[in-house]
Image (cartoon, helix red, strand yellow):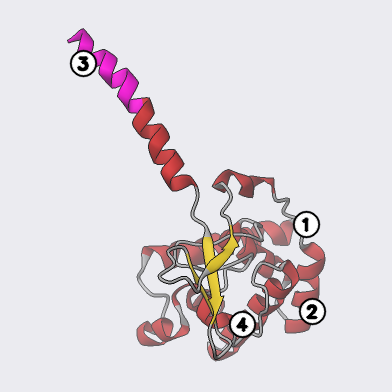
Amino acid sequence: MLARKVIQYILIPVVLFAAGVLSAHADIYMYIDSKGVSHFTNTPTSSKYKIYMRERSTRASSIYASSKYDQIISEASKRHGIAFPLLKAQIKVESDFNPRAVSKKGALGLMQIMPKNIKALRVNDPFDPRENIMAGARYFKQLLERFNGELHLALAAYNAGPNTVDRYKRVPPFRETVDYVEKVMKYYQIFKKG
């Protein structure tokens, strides 16, 4: 009995440490194909992929100040006619103001632009804060126009894709999308007051 307890006290920290070490880093690899399309992955399938970025610990995101990108957000707001607090709320929810953020699905940067949208949005470096915010704001403006200014639908389309919102004709009944819209609206109200 005592031996089993000792083994538990030794094994549990070792297993937790190993799990933390193994899952702590997921590097991002990239290659540009013959058509000029950028491909990103965390699991390269050929030698064409070269290291693009080494993932930092998620704890690093808390160091990014919420006002650091206000000047760029303000410029994007004026250029694309989207309320400053709304853009800021999207960035808060998308990346928590981390310009190097990479989602599990491969979305990149402050406004979490999907790799398939990078070329269409004319983004050269998705981790450049100005490029990312301008492109994300431009795309969100397109969604607002597509959904006749209905903010909840445009936000849902930013998260789940416009075709999905078209199919449901409302905010899709996916927990992630419903939560996303609620969080952005919550921070929108907070930033409006600030």
Q: Does the CB distance between marks 2 and 1 fall below 8 Å? A: no
What is the spatial separation of the Cα atoms under label 1 and label 3, in whole angstroms?
52 Å
Report the magenta stretch's main SS: helix
Q: Which residue is mark 1?
A: 68
Depth check: 189 or 122 in front? 122
Q: Quadrant of residue 141?
A: bottom right
Q: Which residue is mark 4?
A: 139
Give whichever of discs 3 and 2 has the lower sequence position. 3
Q: Nearer the viewer, mark 3 or mark 4?
A: 3
Give whichever of discs 1 and 3 has the lower sequence position. 3
How busy is the neighbourhood of tag 1: few (under 14 within 10 Å), some, or many (20 plus)?
few
Q: Which residue is mark 3?
A: 4
Q: Residue at x 61, y 80 (%)?
A: 140
Residue 60 vs 15, above or below: the answer is below
What is the spatial separation of the Cα atoms under label 3 and label 2, in whole angstroms?
65 Å
Q: Residue at x 70, y 59 (%)?
A: 191
Q: Give residue 178's position: percent from left, percent from top.
A: 43, 66
What is the spatial separation of the Cα atoms under label 3 and label 4, in whole angstroms?
58 Å
What is the spatial separation of the Cα atoms under label 2 and label 1, in whole angstroms?
18 Å
Q: What kind of element bears circle 1?
A: loop
Q: What kind of element bears circle 4?
A: helix
Q: Label 1 is placed on what type of residue?
A: Lys
Residue 121 falls left or right of residue 4: right
Q: Residue furthest top?
A: 2
Q: Which residue is mark 2?
A: 78
8 in magenta: yes
